[in-house]
Image: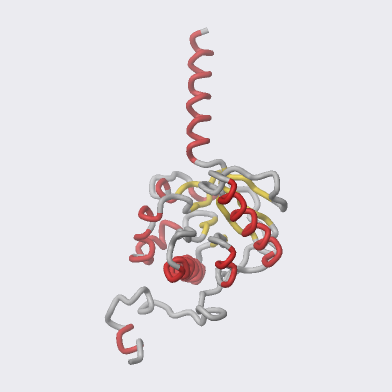
Amino acid sequence: MDGALYKQTRFWENCEKRIFDGVRGYGIPQIKGVRAVGEIDDFIGWNYARSCKEPENKAVHFFVDDYQFVRLWTQPDTYLSMLSKFKYVLAPDFSTYTDFPKALQIYNHYRKHWLGAYFQENGINIVPTVSWADEDSFEWCFDGEPCNSVVAISSVGCMKDARSKRLFLNGYNEMIERLQPSEIIFYGAVPNECTGNIIRIKPFQEKWRKAVCDGRKRSVERVF
């Protein structure tokens, strides 16, 4: 039965809003590229986006637990106005863990690209977020990503052991070869093996520790 019979009246994984032509075998929506991001005051995690003041020169990232932003998938129109206030929005990074079933990995890749393409159509400046699982994911994990564009990635959780680091570096090198990114927004620790025009974002925990240390330093200075 043709899904068009349902699109007008039912929620159906957002197909009632938009069906993109998609690319390659899995029909992943294509995200348009960004050549450079320029000056950005700060990168804000999605969980702090609503309370962010002066978002005009800030960017929103989704390197947080999936449950915190799954509502973007279920109610994308609700957040268009808020996200449009930011200078850039990194495409929502639904997890593609290596122990997930392949079908779930591809579904999460699809959701990321559907939201990225939909937000771009609605005037939001999207930076593609690239992720991968193991070498088998190279079959589809770069589908819909632009070449010669700024991309965003995260290494958080990928350096816990030698196998995790190897998988991360294999995917990173594959990304460099296939996409040839102009800039790489890098959230988390940057391994020495990683090359390219890297813009590092400090994870929240690192920024929090620095703020605590700075606060203690100022307290000491005030005392003395």
Residue 21 placed where, x, y %?
Answer: 51, 82
Residue 97 left/right relative to 171: left
At which x and y percent is residue 5? 31, 89
Residue 39 placement (x, y as % from top left):
63, 48
Q: Is residue 41 left or right of residue 44?
A: right
The residue sitting at the top extreme is: 224
| In the image, residue 59 above or below residue 135 | above
Residue lying at 69% horizontally and 44% vertically, measured from the top left: 192
Q: Is residue 114 above or below residue 200?
A: below
- For this rendering, which residue is in front, 97 or 58? 97
Q: How far across and how far down the image is residue 8, in percent?
A: 31, 83
In front here: 208 or 55? 208
Decide if residue 149 is on the left or right side of residue 80: right
How was the colour assigned to the protein in this rendering?
secondary structure
Visible residue check, residue 122:
no
The answer to whether any part of residue 223 appears in the image is yes
Quadrant of residue 71 within the rendered picture = bottom left
Q: Is residue 222 above or below residue 208?
A: above
Task: Report the quarter where the N terminus lies.
Answer: bottom left
